[in-house]
């Protein structure tokens, strides 16, 4: 009986060792399998994150001072929307459409003439759905060079004063002012106007002083890229 008991425990130990070895192999297999699955998912996630949702044909557009229209083409893998980084730019830079579906797309960008004193720039964006990706496009526009064509730049008035007509044309809005604070004796009927052909009446009051007098008028367009000076002279009573 003792021998049987010993044989039983020996058999039990051998069975336990066999199961233990099998369990180690199973656990090792599970560990290797789970590690492989984790690496695969991580690589898949990195691949998805690095994949571009929006592909632009260009990221910079330049416009002449006169303005114009350009087509921005791009491909999007999701629905998208577009807008201005600076909301103030929406007054001179227009986007149509400003949203769309996945696939090949085109935004028509229209820029108005630049009559400001300097070149201007802005940035527009195209954003994929759920804000997963945003692409930026820079927009630049040069300043419109002004031109003033003036008929005469010098006027002489007699001592008793008088009225003369300044005739000119400007491709931009314009303004006129007296260069000297002492030139109040020389006035004009309007101080600004729109682009095109214009006329300004210049009035010189009587000169009762002992000397001749002179002043200058400054005629400039609204972005100050063109400036003309008009010389005004007036005799005294003894001349």
Image (cartoon, rainbow, N blue to C red):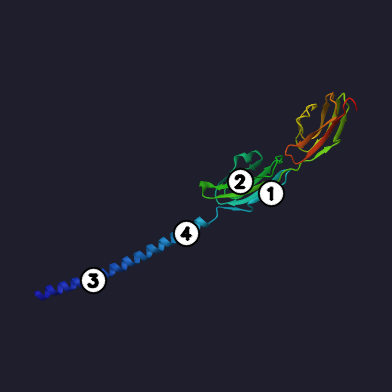
- Name the residue furthest right: 239
**In-front residue for pair 18/226:** 226
Q: Are marks 4 and 2 in contact (CB under 8 Å)?
A: no
> Which label was assigned to residue 44?
4
Q: Quadrant of the C terminus?
A: top right
Q: Which residue is mark 3?
A: 17
- Judged left or right of residue 98, residue 226 is right
Ranked by sequence position, the earlier of labels 2 and 1 is: 1
> Which x, y percent locates residue 17?
23, 71
Question: Marks 4/2: CA distance?
Answer: 31 Å
Residue matched to label 2: 124
Q: Residue at x 60, y 40 (%)?
A: 87
- Of residue 66 and residue 211, the one placed in the foreground of this image is 211
Tell me: 171 left or right of 61: right
Q: Nearer the viewer, residue 63 or 5?
A: 63
Name the residue: 87% across, 31% down. Answer: 156
Q: Position of residue 85 (x, y in %)?
A: 59, 44
Neighbourhood count class around disc 2 (C-alpha, 10 Å): few under 14, some 14–19, many 20 upward: many
Q: Nearer the viewer, mark 4 or mark 2?
A: 2
Q: Is residue 188 rendered to the left or right of residue 74?
A: right
Q: Tell which circle, 1 or 4, labels the residue nearer the N-terminal end.
A: 4
Q: Disc 2 and disc 1: Cα gap in Å?
A: 13 Å
Q: Which residue lies under the disc numbered 1?
A: 62
In this view of the protein, which residue sits in the foreground, 224 or 59? 224
Do we see residue 73 in this rendering? yes
Q: CA distance from mark 3 to mark 2?
A: 71 Å
Q: Are marks 2 and 1 in contact (CB under 8 Å)?
A: no
């Amino acid at each position: 009986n003792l021998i049987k008991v010993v044989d039983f425990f020996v058999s039990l130990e051998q069975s336990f060792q066999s199961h233990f070895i099998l369990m180690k192999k199973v656990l090792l297999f599970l560990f290797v399998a789970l590690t492989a699955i984790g690496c695969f998912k991580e690589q898949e996630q990195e691949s998805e994150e690095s994949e571009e949702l929006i592909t632009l044909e260009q990221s910079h557009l330049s416009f002449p001072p006169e303005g114009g229209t350009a087509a921005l083409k791009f491909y999007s893998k999701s629905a998208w929307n577009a807008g201005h980084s600076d909301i103030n730019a929406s007054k001179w830079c227009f986007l149509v459409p400003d949203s769309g579906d996945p696939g090949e797309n085109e935004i028509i960008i229209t820029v108005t003439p630049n009559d400001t004193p300097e070149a201007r720039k802005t940035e527009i964006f195209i954003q994929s759905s759920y804000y997963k990706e945003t692409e930026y496009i820079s927009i630049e526009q040069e300043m419109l060079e002004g031109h003033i064509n003036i008929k005469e730049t010098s006027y002489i008035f007699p001592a008793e004063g008088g009225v003369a007509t300044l005739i000119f044309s400007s491709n931009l809005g314009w303004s006129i002012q007296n260069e000297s604070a002492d030139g109040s004796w020389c006035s004009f009927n309007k101080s600004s106007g729109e682009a095109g052909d214009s006329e300004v009446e210049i009035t010189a009051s009587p000169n009762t002083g002992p000397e001749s007098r002179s002043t200058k008028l400054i005629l400039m367009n609204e972005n100050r890229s063109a400036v003309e000076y008009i010389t005004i002279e007036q005799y005294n009573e003894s001349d």
